[in-house]
Image: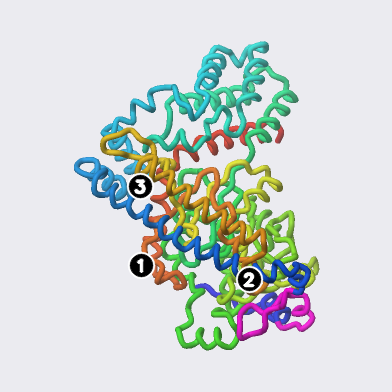
Amino acid sequence: MQIYAQSESVKAFEAALSNDDTDKVTSAPDWAPAGEITSRSDYANYGIGYHLLRWPVLVGLTLWVLPLLVIYFGIRLYVSISEWLFVWRGPRRQLRQNLRAATTIKEWRYWAAKLDKFLGFNAWRDEDKSTYYDYRTVRNIIRQINALDSTNQKEAEQVAVILETCVKYNFAGINNPQVYSQCYSGTKKLIDRFNATVIKKINEVASPECPLAEETKSVLFKSMSVNLGKSALCLSGGGSFCYRHLGVVRILLDLNLLPPIVSGTSGGGLVAALVCTRTDEELKQLINPKIADNLTACWEPFPDWLVRWWKTGARFDSVDWAERAKFFTLGDLTFKEAYERTGKILNVSTVPANPQTPAILCNHITSPDCLIWSALLASAAVPGLLKPVVLMRKTRQGSFVPYSFGSRWRDGSFRTDIPTQALNTFFNVNYTIVSQVNPHIRLFAYLPRGQVGRPVIHKYSKSRWRGGFLLATMETSVKLEIKKCLKLMRNLDLMPHVLDQDFSTVFLQKFEGSVTVWPRIGLRDFLKILSDPSRDELAAMMLAGEKTVFPKIAMISHFIGLQHVVENGQVGICG
């Protein structure tokens, strides 16, 4: 176990936490009995109607939501049981079991091809037509661009015009998840040919044999880069479930598909920091089950942390966590220093304890001198587990002082578990790979039309709806009704603000990306959501993360493969 000795930075952090002046700018203490909840004086201006009707309306909506939840999970249970009893039987069940048992991408592709052939999905892949993308435009571009010679000046100019037009995110719908959700292995062969053809022509234009002027090439590649956008890996929070992210990172790293932009929230921030403070070669050596020896956040025995929780309102000690978090951040690295060391862009979501203060997506642009480990603690400060903490900044003289006037910060999952909008604003990210392990989100992770690499199967019909159209309609309607009630509670300010925090945002955020992986989590795993894994347990977690990525590889590789070619060409031309 690697633990950094208590350094000057941790001592400064401990002093900032105990600073009385700092406490004055924070919200109420994190958990009773550590303090009292701040009263909301603004309630007095809401009028007599609000005070008379608030609780009756809130109780009425709650009583309406509870039976909806029972109906919702009843539908889910019925569909799952019926699929197991009537759909997955005989040879198709054995093929699916073989597919699920695959532990390598090569093995998975083999069984996916077998299953597609058995279920007759190859015919769908061979046919160009589909309502999910503009197959006519895709087919015409392939025909036109293949007829042009990139070594001829006039024809090379036409190639450049076509590339500038079609190298865009989701051009003609080719990045639509539905075109990757109709079979197990990949998508339409026409889309495969389109990607291969475009990549070939981009390489030809970037080569010295292409007669286009260097300035023309430079403008073209800059335009393609902006239009296509960047990709990012977003790692959600979720306690010890977040160690499954390590498997997601490992398979993407092995296949050269790991984006250089990584965001993490709460526990996902630990993995994101590990990725962005190490080079790819270092990660290949580091990410293995032996790393479990350094995962020691939950080391305290039950009596000790229970006493702390009763006295302070927090299970974990902030200073102790600061020392242990340094393994993930290579000591006292700042966001800017991590970027300069690896070229990777680390983003950590932090939410202020004061609800009126805007959230910060910490990175080398917004908070370059902020110590990464302090942002990780802030992003993991869940009420009842860790009290809101102070972000720390490294000065030019090498000393450590509180960041952002000493304000307190807490778990980023409260508002921005998956910061897609901020990533697009700062880095032109159009394509997000989300690894989602938040337990309260997984309860509603149900896609009635299938998902990427996992099509909907029926025994007797060709319906593309799980359980049939009627049950899919009921499931979607009930889920939307529950969300509507939660939004109504939020917009009318009906829900009590516990710890000065509106918890409705925990459910009403956008938790998915361009492609979302859901690492498998069993009921028994919930018993260990706040415990450190052994080497064997971590190996199982990492394998679960890897296997969840297998069905998404085709979709991910199409976008990131194109992104790599554009970026390499831009570097070769523009320097």
Quadrant in the picture for residue 225: top right
Q: Secondary structure at mark 1?
A: helix
Nearer mark to the viewer, of 1 and 2? 2
Q: Which mark is residue 104?
A: 3
Q: Is residue 124 magenta?
A: no
* CA separation in Å, label 1 and label 2: 32 Å
Q: Which residue type does callout 3 highlight?
A: Thr
Region of the chain picked out in magenta, as a range: 18-40
- Marks 2 and 3 in Cβ contact (< 8 Å): no
Above or below, 556 relative to 121: below
Q: Is residue 397 visible?
A: yes
| Majority secondary structure of magenta residues | loop
Ranked by sequence position, the earlier of labels 2 and 3 is 3
**How many residues crowd mark 2 within 10 Å: few (<14), some (14–19), many (20+)?**
some
Residue at position x 56%, y 63% in the image = 270
Residue at position x 26%, y 33% in the image = 118
Q: Which residue type does callout 1 highlight?
A: Arg
Give residue 234's position: percent from left, percent from top. 56, 52
